[in-house]
Structure formats: C-alpha cells, structure tokens
Image (tube, rainbow, N blue to C red):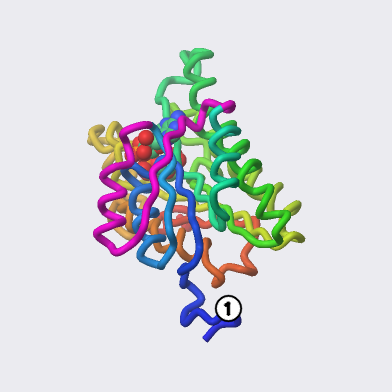
C-alpha cells in the first residue's frame, strides 16, 4: 500500500489525464496506457480524429471524453483549457500533438516554420500554462511532454522540428524549476525512431532507414507501446521525485 492507499505506485485510478493529439500513433498508445493504469482520459485533438482511440479506451475498460482542439489555435487553447478546468480536476497533461516538415534548411519557408512552431511549441506552452495553473494552485499535478531525440541532436532536414523540440526540453526544465516547489512535476519523453505516420518518409527511404537501424542497439524501430509505459510512470506517484527530466525511450540510440 502507498501513502494514498493505492496498491501500486503506478496506479492512476481517480486521476484525470488529458492527452493531446491522441487519435493515432504515440498519443493513442499513451491514452490507452493511462486508461489501463486507471486514469479517466480526455482526448484532445482535431475534430473527428479521436473516435478510434475512445473505442480502444472503452474496450480496455476505461473512460474517455473527446474534446475538439487545434492546439495551434491559441484562442481555442485558452477557451478549451478554461472549460476543462471548470468541468473537472485535470491531474495529468500529456502534450503529445506534434508535426514535422522535412526540407533543406536553405529552402524552409516562413509558413512551414511558423506551422511547426505553432503546434509543437506555442500550443504546447499555452495549453500547459492554462491546465497547469490550477495544478500549481492546488499543489499537485504532472505534465509530460513528448519531446524527441531532436531535443538533444540536430537531425537532418528538419530544422524547425529540432528548434521546436529543443524548445520543449527548455520549457520542461523551466517549468520544473518554477512549479516543483508547488508539487507539480514537469517532465518529457524523448522517443527514438518509432513506427508512426511521423516517420513514414524516413522508413520509405531505404538508405536512411538502414543507417538509422544500424545505430539502434535494440536492433529495431520503436513502437507506440514502447512509449506508453514511460508516460504512465511519469504520470504516476512513482515519479513524484522526478522533475525536469527528458527521458529517452530510444532503444539505446543516445548511448552510441
Ligand atoms: N514517431 C517518432 O519516431 C517520434 C519520435 C520523436 C518524437 N515524436 C513526437 O511524438 C508525438 C506524436 O507523434 P507520432 O509519431 O505519433 O505522429 P503522428 O503524426 O502519428 O501523430 C501526431 C498527432 O498529433 C495530432 N496533431 C497534429 N497537429 C495537431 C494540432 N494542430 N492540434 C491537435 N492535434 C494535432 C495529429 O492529429 C496526430 O494525432 C509528436 O510530438 C512527435 O513529434 C515522434
């Protein structure tokens, strides 16, 4: 038994977890993983994209609400965030929604740059601010953002993505410093090379795909489920003394 009466420090029964961009890929697996750990989940994302995940959560015995939100629309972030705070206590926020644009840096246009920063960085910060405010006031909460290996490295032909994901690591550490004294832990997960729509172009490029695989000690690309356990851990009481950390879930890539 833990101090809260739960049987496991990873138990999330009685907690409400909001997951952005949960309609597919890593966000879907994280939402289902949190629900399996006992959390009620709110699937926050683009209209019509979250239904399959709601069904998977229900099949897993969990409860999911769907709320429409384009995280790059900062007025909507403020409105939807306020509605969520008014209707429930949000205990966990998983910032998962993200996009990538591949181009040589000399060719990157302003629109593409802005789009990536709007989703991956600006939306993430202002949603975290909105849902984090009551966590800080209450003295309890968890924020888990999906960063990237490109929070540490530069990558190839993805300069806006690398800039945004370095920014996610920076926000994580800055908020951990400010919110840690108020009982709120702010961490991030840096997935390695995972099989999702985000990496389709890489996997279709035989040379890139082979050179990536050669560097992964695990000898395989990651799956969405590989990220779910780390997200449950960082959302749970087991991680109460983990703060400001960016956890690589990369099959060992960063160790090479
Ligand atoms: N797949 C990988 O190898 C990998 C590696 C490192 C980091 N990541 C990160 O993991 C996260 C999830 O990516 P994924 O691999 O599952 O890719 P994905 O493209 O399958 O999923 C991205 C999700 O974000 C949602 N989304 C995009 N723009 C949005 C917006 N404006 N508002 C709301 N939702 C929006 C999409 O609808 C989708 O559900 C992203 O932040 C991505 O950068 C992925």
x and y, in percent, of residue 110 in the image:
53, 13
**Image point 34% across, 53% down: which residue?**
29
The local secondary structure at tag 1 comes to loop
**Image point 57% across, 55% down: which residue?**
89
* Span shown in magenta: 47-75
Residue 196's quadrant in the figure?
A: top left
x and y, in percent, of residue 107 in the image:
46, 13
Residue furthest to the bottom:
1
User: As displayed, is residue 174 above or below residue 7?
Assistant: above
Q: Residue 151 vs residue 252: left or right? A: right
Q: Is residue 211 visible?
A: no
**Image point 65% across, 42% down: which residue?**
129
Query: Looking at this view, is 148 or 94 the one in front?
Result: 94
Residue furthest to the front:
87
Q: Residue 93 vs residue 97: left or right? A: right
User: Ligand 1 is located in which of the four quadrants?
Assistant: top left
Query: Looking at this view, is 58 or 93 the one in front?
Result: 58
x and y, in percent, of residue 65 in the image:
39, 48
Q: Residue 253 vs residue 137: left or right? A: left
């Amino acid at each position: 038994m833990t101090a809260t009466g739960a049987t496991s420090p990873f138990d999330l029964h009685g907690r409400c977890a909001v997951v952005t961009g949960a309609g597919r890929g890593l966000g879907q697996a994280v939402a289902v993983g949190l629900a399996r750990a006992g959390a009620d989940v709110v699937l926050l994302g683009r209209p019509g994209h979250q239904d399959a995940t709601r069904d998977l959560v229900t099949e897993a015995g969990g409860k999911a609400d769907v709320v429409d939100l384009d995280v790059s629309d900062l007025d909507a972030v403020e409105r939807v965030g306020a509605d969520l705070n008014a209707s429930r206590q949000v205990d966990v926020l998983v910032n998962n929604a993200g996009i990538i644009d591949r181009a040589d840096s000399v060719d990157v246009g302003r629109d593409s740059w802005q789009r990536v920063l709007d989703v991956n960085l600006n939306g993430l910060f202002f949603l975290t601010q909105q849902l984090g405010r009551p966590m800080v006031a209450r003295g309890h909460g968890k924020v888990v953002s999906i960063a990237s290996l490109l929070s540490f490295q530069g990558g190839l032909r993805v300069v806006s993505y690398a800039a945004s994901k370095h920014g996610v690591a920076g926000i994580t550490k800055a908020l951990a410093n400010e919110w840690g004294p108020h009982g709120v832990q702010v961490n991030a997960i840096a997935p390695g090379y995972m099989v999702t729509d985000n990496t389709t172009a890489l996997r279709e490029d035989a040379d890139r795909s082979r050179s990536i695989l050669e560097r992964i000690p695990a000898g395989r690309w990651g799956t969405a489920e590989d990220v779910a356990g780390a997200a449950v851990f960082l959302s749970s009481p087991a991680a109460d003394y983990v703060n400001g950390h960016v956890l690589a879930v990369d099959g060992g890539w960063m160790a090479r």
